[in-house]
Image: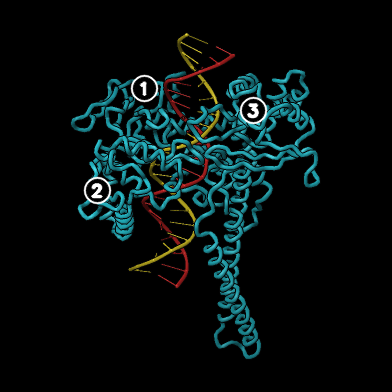
Chain colours: A cyan, B red, C yellow
DNA sequence: TCCGGGACTTAGAATTCTCGGA
DNA sequence: TCCGAGAATTCTAAGTCCCGGA
Protein backbone atom coordinates (compact mmCIF):
# COMPACT_ATOMS: atom_id res chain seq x y z
CA UNK A 1 0.00 0.00 0.00
CA UNK A 2 1.23 3.45 -0.78
CA UNK A 3 1.87 5.85 2.01
CA UNK A 4 0.64 9.37 1.68
CA UNK A 5 3.23 11.69 0.29
CA UNK A 6 4.39 14.78 2.13
CA UNK A 7 4.16 18.00 0.26
CA UNK A 8 7.14 20.04 1.32
CA UNK A 9 9.68 17.75 -0.35
CA UNK A 10 10.01 19.51 -3.63
CA UNK A 11 8.47 22.49 -5.26
CA UNK A 12 7.95 22.28 -8.97
CA UNK A 13 9.51 24.85 -11.24
CA UNK A 14 6.91 27.04 -12.86
CA UNK A 15 5.40 25.22 -15.81
CA UNK A 16 7.22 21.94 -15.26
CA UNK A 17 4.96 19.38 -13.72
CA UNK A 18 7.25 16.39 -13.35
CA UNK A 19 10.79 15.23 -13.90
CA UNK A 20 10.30 11.51 -14.31
CA UNK A 21 7.29 9.46 -15.33
CA UNK A 22 7.20 5.75 -16.02
CA UNK A 23 4.21 3.44 -16.48
CA UNK A 24 2.99 0.29 -18.18
CA UNK A 25 0.46 1.89 -20.49
CA UNK A 26 -3.28 1.31 -20.21
CA UNK A 27 -5.05 -2.02 -19.83
CA UNK A 28 -7.22 -3.10 -22.77
CA UNK A 29 -10.53 -4.88 -22.20
CA UNK A 30 -10.75 -8.48 -23.47
CA UNK A 31 -11.74 -9.22 -27.06
CA UNK A 32 -15.34 -9.97 -27.91
CA UNK A 33 -16.36 -13.62 -27.46
CA UNK A 34 -18.94 -14.81 -29.99
CA UNK A 35 -22.34 -15.99 -28.80
CA UNK A 36 -22.67 -19.64 -27.82
CA UNK A 37 -24.47 -21.91 -30.29
CA UNK A 38 -27.71 -21.96 -28.32
CA UNK A 39 -28.21 -18.19 -28.35
CA UNK A 40 -29.68 -16.65 -31.46
CA UNK A 41 -30.73 -13.39 -32.95
CA UNK A 42 -33.99 -13.30 -34.89
CA UNK A 43 -35.15 -10.99 -37.61
CA UNK A 44 -38.79 -10.99 -38.56
CA UNK A 45 -39.18 -14.24 -36.64
CA UNK A 46 -36.34 -15.95 -38.50
CA UNK A 47 -33.05 -17.07 -37.01
CA UNK A 48 -30.13 -15.03 -38.39
CA UNK A 49 -26.46 -15.77 -37.84
CA UNK A 50 -24.76 -12.39 -37.73
CA UNK A 51 -21.20 -11.59 -38.68
CA UNK A 52 -18.92 -11.14 -35.70
CA UNK A 53 -18.81 -7.34 -35.90
CA UNK A 54 -22.57 -6.98 -36.25
CA UNK A 55 -23.15 -9.55 -33.53
CA UNK A 56 -21.00 -7.68 -31.04
CA UNK A 57 -23.02 -4.51 -31.53
CA UNK A 58 -26.28 -6.45 -31.34
CA UNK A 59 -25.15 -7.77 -27.97
CA UNK A 60 -24.60 -4.20 -26.71
CA UNK A 61 -28.23 -3.47 -27.46
CA UNK A 62 -29.56 -6.79 -26.22
CA UNK A 63 -27.86 -6.33 -22.87
CA UNK A 64 -29.58 -2.99 -22.37
CA UNK A 65 -33.10 -4.14 -23.13
CA UNK A 66 -34.35 -3.50 -19.59
CA UNK A 67 -33.10 0.04 -19.77
CA UNK A 68 -35.31 2.95 -20.62
CA UNK A 69 -32.74 4.09 -23.17
CA UNK A 70 -33.72 1.31 -25.57
CA UNK A 71 -37.28 2.64 -25.76
CA UNK A 72 -36.21 6.12 -26.79
CA UNK A 73 -36.59 7.06 -30.41
CA UNK A 74 -33.31 8.95 -30.72
CA UNK A 75 -31.39 6.16 -29.06
CA UNK A 76 -32.93 3.52 -31.30
CA UNK A 77 -32.37 5.53 -34.47
CA UNK A 78 -28.75 6.30 -33.68
CA UNK A 79 -28.10 2.73 -32.67
CA UNK A 80 -29.64 1.34 -35.83
CA UNK A 81 -27.67 3.66 -38.10
CA UNK A 82 -24.38 2.74 -36.45
CA UNK A 83 -25.23 -0.92 -36.22
CA UNK A 84 -25.91 -1.08 -39.94
CA UNK A 85 -22.46 0.36 -40.55
CA UNK A 86 -21.01 -2.72 -38.87
CA UNK A 87 -23.08 -5.13 -40.94
CA UNK A 88 -22.05 -6.95 -44.08
CA UNK A 89 -23.81 -5.93 -47.33
CA UNK A 90 -25.95 -9.01 -47.05
CA UNK A 91 -26.99 -8.25 -43.48
CA UNK A 92 -27.75 -4.67 -44.38
CA UNK A 93 -30.01 -5.83 -47.14
CA UNK A 94 -31.91 -8.12 -44.80
CA UNK A 95 -32.11 -6.08 -41.58
CA UNK A 96 -33.96 -2.90 -42.35
CA UNK A 97 -36.23 -2.37 -39.38
CA UNK A 98 -35.17 -2.37 -35.74
CA UNK A 99 -38.71 -3.16 -34.65
CA UNK A 100 -38.45 -6.53 -36.40
CA UNK A 101 -35.32 -7.47 -34.48
CA UNK A 102 -35.57 -9.89 -31.61
CA UNK A 103 -32.73 -9.69 -29.10
CA UNK A 104 -34.66 -11.77 -26.55
CA UNK A 105 -32.23 -14.66 -26.33
CA UNK A 106 -29.25 -12.35 -26.13
CA UNK A 107 -30.96 -10.47 -23.35
CA UNK A 108 -31.84 -13.66 -21.50
CA UNK A 109 -28.27 -14.87 -21.78
CA UNK A 110 -26.99 -11.64 -20.32
CA UNK A 111 -29.42 -11.78 -17.42
CA UNK A 112 -28.46 -15.37 -16.71
CA UNK A 113 -24.79 -14.38 -16.69
CA UNK A 114 -25.42 -11.59 -14.21
CA UNK A 115 -27.41 -13.95 -12.01
CA UNK A 116 -24.73 -16.63 -12.18
CA UNK A 117 -22.09 -14.12 -11.24
CA UNK A 118 -24.04 -13.16 -8.14
CA UNK A 119 -23.75 -16.71 -6.87
CA UNK A 120 -20.06 -17.08 -7.63
CA UNK A 121 -17.42 -17.29 -4.97
CA UNK A 122 -14.75 -14.67 -4.83
CA UNK A 123 -12.34 -17.00 -6.53
CA UNK A 124 -14.72 -17.64 -9.40
CA UNK A 125 -15.24 -13.94 -9.81
CA UNK A 126 -11.55 -13.75 -10.66
CA UNK A 127 -10.81 -11.40 -7.82
CA UNK A 128 -7.21 -12.50 -7.88
CA UNK A 129 -6.92 -12.06 -11.63
CA UNK A 130 -8.34 -8.55 -11.32
CA UNK A 131 -5.92 -7.77 -8.54
CA UNK A 132 -3.12 -8.89 -10.82
CA UNK A 133 -4.29 -6.47 -13.50
CA UNK A 134 -4.38 -3.66 -10.95
CA UNK A 135 -0.94 -4.55 -9.66
CA UNK A 136 0.49 -4.54 -13.14
CA UNK A 137 -1.28 -1.59 -14.76
CA UNK A 138 -2.64 0.37 -11.80
CA UNK A 139 0.57 2.05 -10.69
CA UNK A 140 3.19 4.33 -12.11
CA UNK A 141 6.38 5.96 -10.97
CA UNK A 142 6.29 9.72 -10.73
CA UNK A 143 9.31 11.61 -9.47
CA UNK A 144 10.50 8.63 -7.41
CA UNK A 145 7.07 7.98 -5.89
CA UNK A 146 4.95 4.98 -6.74
CA UNK A 147 1.52 6.43 -7.45
CA UNK A 148 -1.82 4.89 -8.24
CA UNK A 149 -3.24 5.50 -11.69
CA UNK A 150 -6.90 6.55 -11.74
CA UNK A 151 -8.51 5.10 -14.84
CA UNK A 152 -5.88 2.74 -16.22
CA UNK A 153 -8.51 0.60 -17.97
CA UNK A 154 -9.32 1.60 -21.52
CA UNK A 155 -13.05 2.25 -21.87
CA UNK A 156 -14.72 -0.78 -23.42
CA UNK A 157 -16.87 -0.38 -26.54
CA UNK A 158 -20.60 0.03 -26.14
CA UNK A 159 -23.55 2.26 -26.92
CA UNK A 160 -23.16 5.89 -25.97
CA UNK A 161 -25.28 6.80 -22.97
CA UNK A 162 -25.52 10.55 -23.05
CA UNK A 163 -27.44 12.26 -20.27
CA UNK A 164 -30.82 13.87 -20.71
CA UNK A 165 -32.01 14.55 -24.19
CA UNK A 166 -28.73 13.84 -25.90
CA UNK A 167 -28.87 13.89 -29.70
CA UNK A 168 -26.12 11.26 -29.97
CA UNK A 169 -27.43 8.72 -27.49
CA UNK A 170 -27.31 5.16 -28.82
CA UNK A 171 -24.37 5.76 -31.16
CA UNK A 172 -21.65 3.12 -31.19
CA UNK A 173 -18.66 3.83 -29.02
CA UNK A 174 -15.94 2.03 -30.91
CA UNK A 175 -13.43 -0.42 -29.52
CA UNK A 176 -10.11 1.29 -29.01
CA UNK A 177 -6.88 -0.18 -30.31
CA UNK A 178 -3.34 0.66 -29.22
CA UNK A 179 -3.08 2.44 -32.58
CA UNK A 180 -5.57 5.02 -31.18
CA UNK A 181 -3.59 5.72 -28.02
CA UNK A 182 -0.95 8.36 -27.38
CA UNK A 183 1.47 7.46 -24.61
CA UNK A 184 3.10 10.11 -22.46
CA UNK A 185 6.15 9.25 -20.35
CA UNK A 186 9.74 10.23 -19.70
CA UNK A 187 12.29 9.83 -22.47
CA UNK A 188 14.59 7.98 -20.12
CA UNK A 189 11.87 5.69 -18.72
CA UNK A 190 11.05 2.18 -19.94
CA UNK A 191 8.58 2.92 -22.73
CA UNK A 192 5.32 0.95 -22.30
CA UNK A 193 5.15 -2.09 -24.57
CA UNK A 194 2.04 -2.19 -26.76
CA UNK A 195 -0.03 -5.41 -26.84
CA UNK A 196 1.46 -8.06 -29.17
CA UNK A 197 1.11 -7.26 -32.85
CA UNK A 198 0.19 -3.62 -32.19
CA UNK A 199 1.86 -0.26 -31.97
CA UNK A 200 0.97 2.98 -30.21
CA UNK A 201 -0.35 5.94 -32.13
CA UNK A 202 2.42 8.09 -30.73
CA UNK A 203 4.90 8.28 -27.90
CA UNK A 204 5.23 11.68 -26.36
CA UNK A 205 7.42 13.12 -23.64
CA UNK A 206 5.50 16.16 -22.42
CA UNK A 207 6.23 16.95 -18.80
CA UNK A 208 3.92 19.96 -18.71
CA UNK A 209 0.82 17.76 -18.63
CA UNK A 210 -0.32 15.13 -16.13
CA UNK A 211 -1.81 12.44 -18.36
CA UNK A 212 -0.16 9.09 -19.04
CA UNK A 213 -2.19 8.19 -22.10
CA UNK A 214 -4.84 9.86 -24.25
CA UNK A 215 -7.13 9.19 -27.18
CA UNK A 216 -9.85 10.86 -29.18
CA UNK A 217 -13.29 9.53 -28.49
CA UNK A 218 -15.41 8.83 -31.60
CA UNK A 219 -18.82 10.21 -30.51
CA UNK A 220 -17.99 13.89 -29.91
CA UNK A 221 -14.38 13.89 -31.07
CA UNK A 222 -13.21 15.01 -27.64
CA UNK A 223 -10.10 13.92 -25.78
CA UNK A 224 -9.97 11.31 -23.09
CA UNK A 225 -7.09 10.80 -20.69
CA UNK A 226 -5.55 8.26 -18.39
CA UNK A 227 -4.57 10.21 -15.29
CA UNK A 228 -3.37 9.68 -11.75
CA UNK A 229 -5.57 8.65 -8.85
CA UNK A 230 -7.00 11.38 -6.61
CA UNK A 231 -4.68 10.32 -3.79
CA UNK A 232 -1.60 11.17 -5.82
CA UNK A 233 0.70 14.01 -4.93
CA UNK A 234 -0.05 15.80 -8.17
CA UNK A 235 -3.81 15.75 -7.68
CA UNK A 236 -3.57 16.45 -3.97
CA UNK A 237 -1.49 19.53 -4.48
CA UNK A 238 -3.91 20.80 -7.10
CA UNK A 239 -6.79 20.20 -4.73
CA UNK A 240 -5.07 22.07 -1.94
CA UNK A 241 -4.40 24.99 -4.30
CA UNK A 242 -8.06 25.08 -5.30
CA UNK A 243 -9.13 25.56 -1.69
CA UNK A 244 -6.42 28.14 -1.08
CA UNK A 245 -7.75 30.20 -3.98
CA UNK A 246 -11.24 29.92 -2.49
CA UNK A 247 -9.88 31.09 0.87
CA UNK A 248 -8.27 34.07 -0.82
CA UNK A 249 -11.68 34.95 -2.21
CA UNK A 250 -12.96 34.98 1.35
CA UNK A 251 -10.65 37.88 2.15
CA UNK A 252 -11.84 40.02 -0.75
CA UNK A 253 -15.38 38.85 -1.34
CA UNK A 254 -16.87 41.85 0.43
CA UNK A 255 -15.10 44.24 -1.93
CA UNK A 256 -16.14 42.20 -4.93
CA UNK A 257 -19.75 42.17 -3.76
CA UNK A 258 -19.76 45.92 -3.24
CA UNK A 259 -18.28 46.33 -6.68
CA UNK A 260 -20.92 44.32 -8.49
CA UNK A 261 -23.70 45.98 -6.50
CA UNK A 262 -22.31 49.29 -7.76
CA UNK A 263 -22.04 47.92 -11.27
CA UNK A 264 -25.77 47.20 -11.30
CA UNK A 265 -26.23 50.96 -11.70
CA UNK A 266 -23.72 51.34 -14.48
CA UNK A 267 -24.75 53.14 -17.65
CA UNK A 268 -23.00 50.41 -19.62
CA UNK A 269 -25.32 47.51 -20.37
CA UNK A 270 -22.37 45.07 -20.58
CA UNK A 271 -21.26 46.01 -17.08
CA UNK A 272 -24.79 45.63 -15.73
CA UNK A 273 -25.19 42.23 -17.35
CA UNK A 274 -21.90 41.11 -15.84
CA UNK A 275 -23.02 42.38 -12.44
CA UNK A 276 -26.35 40.55 -12.55
CA UNK A 277 -24.65 37.33 -13.66
CA UNK A 278 -22.14 37.66 -10.86
CA UNK A 279 -24.96 38.27 -8.41
CA UNK A 280 -26.51 34.94 -9.48
CA UNK A 281 -23.21 33.07 -9.42
CA UNK A 282 -22.45 34.36 -5.95
CA UNK A 283 -25.90 34.12 -4.40
CA UNK A 284 -27.14 30.94 -6.10
CA UNK A 285 -23.87 29.15 -6.84
CA UNK A 286 -24.78 28.82 -10.51
CA UNK A 287 -22.17 27.43 -12.90
CA UNK A 288 -20.49 29.76 -15.38
CA UNK A 289 -22.40 28.49 -18.42
CA UNK A 290 -20.06 28.16 -21.38
CA UNK A 291 -21.40 28.27 -24.89
CA UNK A 292 -22.11 24.89 -26.43
CA UNK A 293 -22.25 23.65 -29.96
CA UNK A 294 -25.86 23.24 -30.95
CA UNK A 295 -27.00 19.71 -31.84
CA UNK A 296 -23.86 18.10 -30.44
CA UNK A 297 -25.06 17.80 -26.86
CA UNK A 298 -28.21 17.99 -24.74
CA UNK A 299 -29.62 21.50 -24.42
CA UNK A 300 -28.36 22.58 -21.01
CA UNK A 301 -27.33 25.99 -19.68
CA UNK A 302 -25.45 27.76 -16.91
CA UNK A 303 -25.50 31.37 -15.80
CA UNK A 304 -24.04 33.12 -18.83
CA UNK A 305 -25.97 30.96 -21.29
CA UNK A 306 -29.38 31.42 -19.63
CA UNK A 307 -32.15 32.23 -22.08
CA UNK A 308 -35.22 34.39 -21.59
CA UNK A 309 -37.39 31.26 -21.40
CA UNK A 310 -35.50 30.05 -18.34
CA UNK A 311 -36.63 32.77 -15.95
CA UNK A 312 -39.96 34.30 -15.01
CA UNK A 313 -40.19 37.59 -13.17
CA UNK A 314 -42.79 38.12 -10.44
CA UNK A 315 -43.30 41.58 -8.98
CA UNK A 316 -44.79 39.74 -6.06
CA UNK A 317 -44.93 36.05 -5.23
CA UNK A 318 -45.78 34.25 -1.98
CA UNK A 319 -45.62 37.57 -0.09
CA UNK A 320 -42.11 38.34 -1.37
CA UNK A 321 -41.29 41.17 -3.77
CA UNK A 322 -39.10 40.94 -6.88
CA UNK A 323 -39.03 37.19 -7.23
CA UNK A 324 -37.12 35.46 -10.03
CA UNK A 325 -38.37 32.01 -10.90
CA UNK A 326 -35.63 29.86 -12.45
CA UNK A 327 -36.43 26.75 -14.43
CA UNK A 328 -33.72 25.28 -16.61
CA UNK A 329 -31.65 22.16 -17.20
CA UNK A 330 -28.09 22.44 -15.93
CA UNK A 331 -25.10 20.09 -16.10
CA UNK A 332 -26.09 16.47 -16.69
CA UNK A 333 -29.58 17.75 -17.56
CA UNK A 334 -30.41 18.12 -13.89
CA UNK A 335 -33.29 20.53 -13.47
CA UNK A 336 -32.66 23.73 -11.56
CA UNK A 337 -35.91 25.07 -10.17
CA UNK A 338 -35.87 27.89 -7.69
CA UNK A 339 -37.90 30.94 -6.72
CA UNK A 340 -35.58 33.62 -5.45
CA UNK A 341 -36.36 37.09 -4.09
CA UNK A 342 -33.73 39.46 -5.47
CA UNK A 343 -32.86 43.08 -4.83
CA UNK A 344 -34.82 45.62 -6.87
CA UNK A 345 -31.85 46.72 -8.96
CA UNK A 346 -31.29 43.18 -10.18
CA UNK A 347 -34.97 42.78 -10.90
CA UNK A 348 -35.14 45.99 -12.92
CA UNK A 349 -32.07 45.05 -14.91
CA UNK A 350 -33.50 41.64 -15.73
CA UNK A 351 -36.66 43.31 -17.02
CA UNK A 352 -34.57 45.49 -19.29
CA UNK A 353 -32.47 42.57 -20.52
CA UNK A 354 -35.63 40.69 -21.44
CA UNK A 355 -37.26 43.55 -23.32
CA UNK A 356 -38.07 42.84 -26.96
CA UNK A 357 -36.61 39.37 -26.83
CA UNK A 358 -38.05 36.02 -27.80
CA UNK A 359 -38.06 33.12 -25.30
CA UNK A 360 -35.15 31.45 -27.09
CA UNK A 361 -32.95 34.58 -26.97
CA UNK A 362 -29.99 34.88 -24.64
CA UNK A 363 -30.70 36.68 -21.39
CA UNK A 364 -27.17 38.09 -21.19
CA UNK A 365 -26.62 39.03 -24.83
CA UNK A 366 -23.50 41.10 -24.04
CA UNK A 367 -21.82 38.56 -21.81
CA UNK A 368 -20.03 35.23 -21.99
CA UNK A 369 -17.82 33.24 -19.63
CA UNK A 370 -14.61 34.55 -21.17
CA UNK A 371 -15.57 38.15 -20.50
CA UNK A 372 -16.82 37.30 -17.06
CA UNK A 373 -13.68 35.39 -16.07
CA UNK A 374 -11.43 38.06 -17.52
CA UNK A 375 -13.12 40.56 -15.26
CA UNK A 376 -12.88 38.25 -12.24
CA UNK A 377 -9.19 37.56 -12.71
CA UNK A 378 -8.60 41.33 -12.72
CA UNK A 379 -10.23 41.52 -9.30
CA UNK A 380 -8.16 38.71 -7.83
CA UNK A 381 -5.50 36.51 -9.42
CA UNK A 382 -6.83 33.04 -10.09
CA UNK A 383 -10.46 34.07 -9.59
CA UNK A 384 -12.97 32.46 -11.96
CA UNK A 385 -16.70 31.79 -11.75
CA UNK A 386 -16.25 28.32 -10.32
CA UNK A 387 -14.24 29.61 -7.38
CA UNK A 388 -17.46 31.15 -6.07
CA UNK A 389 -19.03 27.70 -5.92
CA UNK A 390 -16.08 26.33 -3.98
CA UNK A 391 -16.00 29.33 -1.68
CA UNK A 392 -19.73 29.45 -0.99
CA UNK A 393 -19.91 25.70 -0.49
CA UNK A 394 -17.06 25.62 2.00
CA UNK A 395 -18.09 28.71 3.93
CA UNK A 396 -21.64 27.38 4.16
CA UNK A 397 -20.40 24.09 5.61
CA UNK A 398 -18.33 25.91 8.19
CA UNK A 399 -21.18 28.19 9.23
CA UNK A 400 -23.72 25.40 9.35
CA UNK A 401 -21.46 23.18 11.43
CA UNK A 402 -20.99 25.99 13.93
CA UNK A 403 -24.70 26.59 14.07
CA UNK A 404 -25.90 23.01 14.27
CA UNK A 405 -23.49 21.04 16.41
CA UNK A 406 -23.08 20.92 20.17
CA UNK A 407 -20.22 19.21 21.91
CA UNK A 408 -22.69 17.66 24.34
CA UNK A 409 -24.64 15.86 21.60
CA UNK A 410 -24.21 12.14 21.21
CA UNK A 411 -22.35 10.84 18.18
CA UNK A 412 -25.47 10.01 16.17
CA UNK A 413 -26.76 13.55 16.68
CA UNK A 414 -23.42 15.05 15.71
CA UNK A 415 -23.39 13.00 12.53
CA UNK A 416 -26.94 14.08 11.72
CA UNK A 417 -25.84 17.69 12.15
CA UNK A 418 -22.86 17.13 9.90
CA UNK A 419 -25.08 15.62 7.26
CA UNK A 420 -27.48 18.52 7.57
CA UNK A 421 -24.65 20.99 7.05
CA UNK A 422 -23.47 18.90 4.09
CA UNK A 423 -27.05 18.87 2.83
CA UNK A 424 -27.32 22.65 2.97
CA UNK A 425 -24.35 22.77 0.61
CA UNK A 426 -25.74 20.09 -1.69
CA UNK A 427 -29.00 22.03 -1.97
CA UNK A 428 -27.11 25.24 -2.70
CA UNK A 429 -25.14 23.51 -5.45
CA UNK A 430 -28.23 21.64 -6.70
CA UNK A 431 -26.66 18.21 -6.35
CA UNK A 432 -29.53 15.86 -6.94
CA UNK A 433 -29.99 12.14 -7.35
CA UNK A 434 -32.78 9.89 -8.46
CA UNK A 435 -34.56 8.66 -5.32
CA UNK A 436 -33.34 5.12 -4.61
CA UNK A 437 -35.62 2.53 -6.22
CA UNK A 438 -36.54 0.90 -2.95
CA UNK A 439 -36.81 4.13 -0.99
CA UNK A 440 -40.44 3.83 0.15
CA UNK A 441 -39.99 0.21 1.12
CA UNK A 442 -36.82 0.82 3.08
CA UNK A 443 -38.39 3.74 4.95
CA UNK A 444 -41.35 1.54 5.85
CA UNK A 445 -38.99 -1.18 7.05
CA UNK A 446 -37.14 1.26 9.22
CA UNK A 447 -40.41 2.55 10.68
CA UNK A 448 -41.44 -1.02 11.54
CA UNK A 449 -38.16 -1.45 13.37
CA UNK A 450 -38.66 1.80 15.22
CA UNK A 451 -42.14 0.76 16.31
CA UNK A 452 -40.85 -2.59 17.50
CA UNK A 453 -38.10 -0.89 19.45
CA UNK A 454 -40.61 1.48 21.05
CA UNK A 455 -42.62 -1.46 22.29
CA UNK A 456 -39.48 -3.08 23.57
CA UNK A 457 -38.60 0.11 25.42
CA UNK A 458 -42.01 0.30 27.03
CA UNK A 459 -41.65 -3.28 28.16
CA UNK A 460 -38.17 -2.68 29.52
CA UNK A 461 -39.46 0.31 31.48
CA UNK A 462 -42.27 -1.71 32.98
CA UNK A 463 -39.83 -4.42 33.97
CA UNK A 464 -37.55 -1.88 35.56
CA UNK A 465 -40.43 -0.45 37.59
CA UNK A 466 -41.40 -3.93 38.69
CA UNK A 467 -37.85 -4.78 39.67
CA UNK A 468 -37.52 -1.59 41.71
CA UNK A 469 -40.79 -2.27 43.45
CA UNK A 470 -39.79 -5.78 44.33
CA UNK A 471 -36.38 -4.70 45.53
CA UNK A 472 -37.98 -2.14 47.80
CA UNK A 473 -40.64 -4.46 49.15
CA UNK A 474 -38.70 -7.48 50.14
CA UNK A 475 -35.06 -6.82 49.48
CA UNK A 476 -34.05 -8.32 46.22
CA UNK A 477 -33.17 -11.93 45.71
CA UNK A 478 -30.94 -10.74 42.88
CA UNK A 479 -29.19 -7.52 43.98
CA UNK A 480 -28.07 -6.64 40.47
CA UNK A 481 -31.47 -7.07 38.85
CA UNK A 482 -32.41 -3.39 39.06
CA UNK A 483 -29.06 -2.37 37.60
CA UNK A 484 -29.49 -4.79 34.74
CA UNK A 485 -32.98 -3.55 33.99
CA UNK A 486 -31.75 0.05 34.05
CA UNK A 487 -29.03 -0.81 31.57
CA UNK A 488 -31.56 -2.51 29.31
CA UNK A 489 -33.75 0.62 29.28
CA UNK A 490 -30.77 2.79 28.48
CA UNK A 491 -29.62 0.54 25.68
CA UNK A 492 -33.11 0.54 24.23
CA UNK A 493 -33.34 4.32 24.36
CA UNK A 494 -30.00 4.73 22.61
CA UNK A 495 -30.92 2.33 19.86
CA UNK A 496 -34.27 4.02 19.38
CA UNK A 497 -32.67 7.45 19.12
CA UNK A 498 -30.12 6.17 16.63
CA UNK A 499 -32.86 4.74 14.43
CA UNK A 500 -35.01 7.83 14.64
CA UNK A 501 -32.06 9.99 13.70
CA UNK A 502 -31.31 7.65 10.81
CA UNK A 503 -34.91 7.88 9.58
CA UNK A 504 -34.82 11.68 9.67
CA UNK A 505 -31.51 11.75 7.86
CA UNK A 506 -32.67 9.37 5.17
CA UNK A 507 -35.95 11.17 4.58
CA UNK A 508 -34.21 14.52 4.25
CA UNK A 509 -31.73 12.95 1.89
CA UNK A 510 -34.20 11.34 -0.47
CA UNK A 511 -33.35 13.33 -3.58
CA UNK A 512 -30.12 14.94 -2.52
CA UNK A 513 -26.62 13.71 -3.29
CA UNK A 514 -24.12 14.57 -0.56
CA UNK A 515 -21.15 12.89 -2.19
CA UNK A 516 -20.44 15.41 -4.92
CA UNK A 517 -19.94 18.35 -2.58
CA UNK A 518 -17.95 16.26 -0.13
CA UNK A 519 -15.65 15.17 -2.93
CA UNK A 520 -15.28 18.41 -4.85
CA UNK A 521 -16.43 21.50 -2.98
CA UNK A 522 -15.87 21.22 0.75
CA UNK A 523 -12.43 22.09 2.02
CA UNK A 524 -11.53 18.88 3.88
CA UNK A 525 -9.73 20.87 6.55
CA UNK A 526 -13.10 22.15 7.79
CA UNK A 527 -14.23 18.59 8.31
CA UNK A 528 -10.97 17.44 9.88
CA UNK A 529 -11.03 20.34 12.34
CA UNK A 530 -14.67 19.69 13.19
CA UNK A 531 -13.96 16.01 13.83
CA UNK A 532 -11.15 16.95 16.16
CA UNK A 533 -13.29 19.48 18.01
CA UNK A 534 -16.26 17.20 18.30
CA UNK A 535 -14.23 14.08 19.01
CA UNK A 536 -15.81 12.27 16.09
CA UNK A 537 -13.54 9.78 14.32
CA UNK A 538 -12.78 10.91 10.77
CA UNK A 539 -13.83 7.44 9.54
CA UNK A 540 -17.43 8.38 10.36
CA UNK A 541 -17.35 11.08 7.69
CA UNK A 542 -14.79 9.98 5.12
CA UNK A 543 -14.58 6.57 3.48
CA UNK A 544 -11.19 4.98 2.88
CA UNK A 545 -10.95 6.52 -0.59
CA UNK A 546 -11.75 9.99 0.73
CA UNK A 547 -9.26 9.63 3.57
CA UNK A 548 -6.61 8.81 0.99
CA UNK A 549 -7.61 11.69 -1.23
CA UNK A 550 -7.61 14.11 1.67
CA UNK A 551 -4.50 12.72 3.36
CA UNK A 552 -2.89 16.15 3.00
CA UNK A 553 -5.66 17.77 5.02
CA UNK A 554 -5.85 15.04 7.65
CA UNK A 555 -2.09 15.41 8.19
CA UNK A 556 -1.87 19.18 8.42
CA UNK A 557 -5.08 20.37 10.06
CA UNK A 558 -5.44 21.42 13.69
CA UNK A 559 -8.68 21.76 15.60
CA UNK A 560 -8.56 25.56 15.31
CA UNK A 561 -8.50 25.63 11.49
CA UNK A 562 -10.67 28.36 9.99
CA UNK A 563 -11.55 28.31 6.31
C1' DT B 1 -11.39 39.38 -30.35
C1' DC B 2 -12.76 35.09 -31.79
C1' DC B 3 -12.21 30.15 -32.28
C1' DG B 4 -11.00 25.54 -31.71
C1' DG B 5 -7.93 22.48 -29.42
C1' DG B 6 -6.58 20.72 -25.17
C1' DA B 7 -6.36 19.51 -20.23
C1' DC B 8 -8.30 19.20 -16.37
C1' DT B 9 -12.42 19.05 -12.64
C1' DT B 10 -17.04 17.89 -11.55
C1' DA B 11 -21.16 14.89 -12.03
C1' DG B 12 -24.82 11.21 -11.43
C1' DA B 13 -25.50 6.41 -12.68
C1' DA B 14 -23.91 1.76 -12.61
C1' DT B 15 -21.54 -1.70 -10.35
C1' DT B 16 -19.35 -3.92 -6.56
C1' DC B 17 -18.57 -4.59 -1.78
C1' DT B 18 -19.69 -4.92 3.08
C1' DC B 19 -22.01 -5.39 7.15
C1' DG B 20 -25.92 -6.10 10.20
C1' DG B 21 -29.99 -8.63 11.11
C1' DA B 22 -32.90 -12.79 10.40
C1' DT C 1 -24.51 -18.39 7.55
C1' DC C 2 -27.07 -16.16 4.22
C1' DC C 3 -29.32 -12.21 2.21
C1' DG C 4 -30.25 -7.76 0.90
C1' DA C 5 -29.90 -2.85 1.65
C1' DG C 6 -26.99 0.75 1.72
C1' DA C 7 -22.28 2.33 1.38
C1' DA C 8 -18.31 2.60 -1.34
C1' DT C 9 -16.15 2.56 -5.54
C1' DT C 10 -15.86 2.72 -10.46
C1' DC C 11 -17.13 4.58 -14.72
C1' DT C 12 -17.30 7.95 -18.06
C1' DA C 13 -20.10 11.98 -19.54
C1' DA C 14 -20.28 16.81 -19.11
C1' DG C 15 -18.72 20.66 -17.46
C1' DT C 16 -14.84 24.75 -16.76
C1' DC C 17 -11.11 27.27 -18.23
C1' DC C 18 -6.74 28.21 -20.53
C1' DC C 19 -3.94 28.78 -24.51
C1' DG C 20 -2.25 29.92 -28.99
C1' DG C 21 -2.98 31.30 -33.62
C1' DA C 22 -5.42 33.96 -37.12
Q: Which is more toward the observer, A215 or A522?
A: A215
Q: Which residue is mark 2?
A: A48
Percent of width and height locating residue A390: 59, 35
Disc 2 or 3, which lies upstream in sequence? 2
Disc 1 or 2, which lies upstream in sequence? 1
Q: Outermost residue toward the bottom?
A: A474
Q: Are marks 1 and 3 in contact (CB under 8 Å)?
A: no
Percent of width and height locating residue A241: 53, 29
Q: Residue at x 33, y 20 (%)?
A: A205
Percent of width and height locating residue A337: 64, 43
The mark tally for this picture is 3
Residue under disc 1 on the same chain as residue under disc 3: yes
Helix, strand or loop under label 3: loop
Residue A487 visible within the image: no
Q: Which residue is mark 3?
A: A362
- Judging from the image, mark 1 belongs to the subunit labelled A
**Disc 2 crowd, CA 10 A, few/some/many (<14, 14-19, 20+):** some
Mark 2–mark 3 Cα distance, whole angstroms, equals 52 Å
- Judging from the image, mark 2 belongs to the subunit labelled A
Mark 1–mark 3 Cα distance, whole angstroms, equals 47 Å
**Disc 1 crowd, CA 10 A, few/some/many (<14, 14-19, 20+):** few
Amino acid sequence: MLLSVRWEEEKYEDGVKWKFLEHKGPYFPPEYHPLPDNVHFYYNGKKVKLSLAAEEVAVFFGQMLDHEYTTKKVFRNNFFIDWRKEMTDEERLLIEDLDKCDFGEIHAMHKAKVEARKNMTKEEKLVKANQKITDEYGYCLLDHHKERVGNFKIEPPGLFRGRGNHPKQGMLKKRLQPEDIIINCSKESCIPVPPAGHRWKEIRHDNTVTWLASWTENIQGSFKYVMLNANSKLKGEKDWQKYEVARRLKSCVDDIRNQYLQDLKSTDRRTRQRAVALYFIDKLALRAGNEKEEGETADTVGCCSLRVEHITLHEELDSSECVVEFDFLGKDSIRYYNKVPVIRKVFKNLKLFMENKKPGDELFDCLNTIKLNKHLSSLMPGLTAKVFRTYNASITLQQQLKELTNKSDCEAEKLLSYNRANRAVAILCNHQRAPPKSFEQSMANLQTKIDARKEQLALAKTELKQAKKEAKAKGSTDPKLVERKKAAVKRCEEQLLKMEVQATDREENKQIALGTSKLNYLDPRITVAWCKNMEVPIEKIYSKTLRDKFAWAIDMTDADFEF
